[in-house]
Amino acid sequence: MASAFMQRALRAAAAVRGQTRSNPWVGAVLVRDDVVVGEGATAPPGGVHAEAAAIAATGGRGGTLYVTLEPCVPFAGKRTRACVEAIVAAGVERVVVGIPDPDARVQGRGIAWLRERGVTVEVGDGEREVEQQLRPYLKHRSTGRPYVVAKFAASLDGRIATASGDSRWITGEAARERSHQERARVDAILVGSGTVLADDPALTARPGGVLAERQPLRVVVDARGRVPLSARLFDVPPVILATTRRSSPEWRRGVVACGAEVIECAGTESGVDLDQLLEALAQRGVITVWAEGGGTLLGALFRDGQVDELWAFLAPVVIGGDGKAAVAGPGTATVAEAWRLEGTVVESLERDILVRGYVRGR
Ligand SMILES: NC(=O)c1ccc[n+]([C@@H]2O[C@H](COP(=O)([O-])OP(=O)(O)OC[C@H]3O[C@@H](n4cnc5c(N)ncnc54)[C@H](OP(=O)(O)O)[C@@H]3O)[C@@H](O)[C@H]2O)c1
């Protein structure tokens, strides 16, 4: 269980999730005589880190700094002053760290740097809570792939659209608002070309009905270049169309003229090589991908073992018949092999429910 001061640092970090790409969302509090005198969280890239923000929030010297992630060290090309330097300059005597930073440029060097300069460092306060909070970041830095959250809005019988492709709206206002809030916190939204062709969605983050200032990257997998250049998706940047050699040069030029980027990936039986695409997104600093469907894309992501977390919005409605499956394709052969969730949370959203959890084994 995290100490009370670390819990406060965790809350500060939670408030900036989604605004720090491609940095981790970190929180810190500076404590003197058992009183919090400074609090900070990671600013958007190029701005100060949590430790420097907490220190800057107060005058004077000394104290204990509680920080969720190991402080960073100086390295070539760094945009901001290293946090370890700010800590030593402020005369902080003790640093309590949640977890070490797995980033190859840090990896224990921050802790060692401070200890070499006489600062007491303790590691592991709130370790489990911090690991939970930084799951996407830890995956990104340790595997070079983003953390993938699959999301769908389905009927009780697991349909995300009718047989004719109609899907508006299965869930109500509260569920859709929750989804918009989450869109504003992720780095990228991923959909299949089938969804763009069927619904022509804007895919923007509009919490409270207002277009968020910072929009996530919108990514469409479209192996053959079927998405029309008139799609609403192109209205708000940034947008990426991930395709294969099968799309025409004219279509690609049109996509670029619309202000979007084209990424060419290898082709697979399903279309775009998803692992290659995810790696390319990770290299662009995408830590969390919110995969919104449709069923064909989610089926491929599950089958390839790419899904880390699932958010299933379920409406008290039955579509039946040949309605489109939330996770299409052959699925698992046996129930024993089915993708099970753990750490499951159920939320009530007016008439709908949200079931979310981590895909077991991820
Ligand atoms: N209720 C909801 O939450 C929700 C959300 C989204 C969509 N929907 C509904 O779902 C329906 C669309 O779903 P859908 O299953 O037809 O289409 P989809 O999953 O949106 O798109 C599938 C298409 O994406 C392309 N693709 C490229 N690479 C792929 C890969 N590696 N794996 C899988 N697909 C890849 C393929 O077309 P190419 O080969 O041409 O590239 C494929 O046919 C619509 O009716 C929509 O209204 C509902």
Image (cartoon, rainbow, N blue to C red):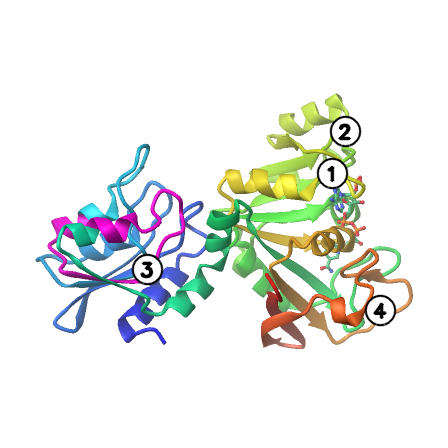
Residue kind at label 4, given as amino acid type: Ile
Disc number lying in front (1 or 4): 1
N-terminal of the pair, mark 1 or mark 4, is 1
Determine which residue is flagged by label 1.
222
Q: What crowding class fits label 3: few (fewer than 14 Cα within 10 Å), some (14-19), or many (20 or more)?
A: many
Is 161 magenta? The answer is no
Q: Are marks 1 and 2 in contact (CB under 8 Å)?
A: yes
User: Residue at image x 56%, y 55%?
Assistant: 183
Can the viewer see residue 174 in this picture? no
**Mark number, residue 314:** none
Q: Which of 167 and 53 is in front in this view?
A: 53
233 lies left or right of 50:
right
* Magenta highlight range: 86-113
Can the viewer see residue 153 in this picture? yes
Can you tell which quarter of the image residue 119 is in? bottom left
Disc number lying in front (4 or 2): 2
Disc 1/disc 3 C-alpha distance (Å): 39 Å
Where residue 351 appears, x then y in whole percent? Answer: 67, 77
Determine which residue is flagged by label 2.
247
Where residue 334 appears, x then y in whole percent? Answer: 81, 68
Q: Does the residue labelled 1 lie within 8 Å of ligand 1?
A: yes
Q: What crowding class fits label 2: few (fewer than 14 Cα within 10 Å), some (14-19), or many (20 or more)?
A: some
Please tell me whether residue 332 is drawn above or below residue 293 in the rendered image: below
